[in-house]
Amino acid sequence: MKSDALFSQFSVNASGLLAERVRMQAIAENIANIHTTRQNGIAKPYQRKEVLFSEVVDKAMQGVAVAGIEPDTTPPQMVYRPGHPDADDKGYVRMPNVELHFEMVDLLSAARAYQANLVAMKVSKEIAQRTLTMGQ
């Protein structure tokens, strides 16, 4: 195995680890703000964040990169809570567009992708070690 191919494999795995870590952080923020109806003192519900990935292919590196973190444009959920301080005149509160079950599935997917990148990196390391000891 050529050394540049080996380092390319490490680059792919490392970029995948970083991208999935960013994704898990965004999911954690979404879950933490599932009931946030007010931002900076204004009755404005938290907007779910989505992490966008892009492919990286150049001579120096290959893999995946975080292309951006954008707000989910799904409208807020309208929940009837007439006693809530942010309720409108009909008793409805604009709640964040975060759904816990969706976030948990997304978190599980990100964790599995992170784990797969770790396993692939371990295998690449083992191949590199075996390659180095073959000549001895």
Image (cartoon, rainbow, N blue to C red):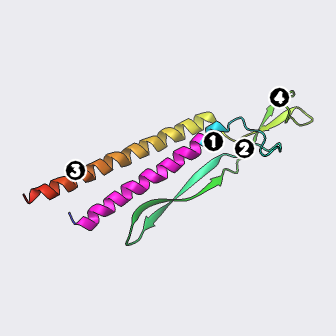
Q: CA distance from mark 2 to mark 4?
A: 17 Å
Membership of 7 in magenta stretch: yes
Instruction: Give the quadrant of residue 100.
Output: top right
Q: Hey, what amino acid is under mark 1?
A: Asn
- The answer to whether the residue labelled 2 contacts the one labelled 3, judged by CB atoms less than 8 Å apart, is no
Residue assigned mark 4: 81
Q: CA distance from mark 1 to mark 2?
A: 8 Å
Residue 27: image location, x then y, percent: 57, 43
- The answer to whether the residue labelled 3 contacts the one labelled 1, judged by CB atoms less than 8 Å apart, is no
Q: Earlier in the sequence, mark 3 or mark 4?
A: 4
Rendered position, 52 above or below 101: below
Q: Nearer the viewer, mark 2 or mark 4?
A: 2
Residue assigned mark 2: 46
Identify the residue shown where x is 27% and y is 65%: 5
Membership of 8 in magenta stretch: yes
Residue assigned mark 1: 30
Identify the residue shown where x is 89% and y is 37%: 88
Residue assigned mark 3: 126
Magenta segment main secondary structure: helix
Q: Hey, what amino acid is under mark 4?
A: Arg
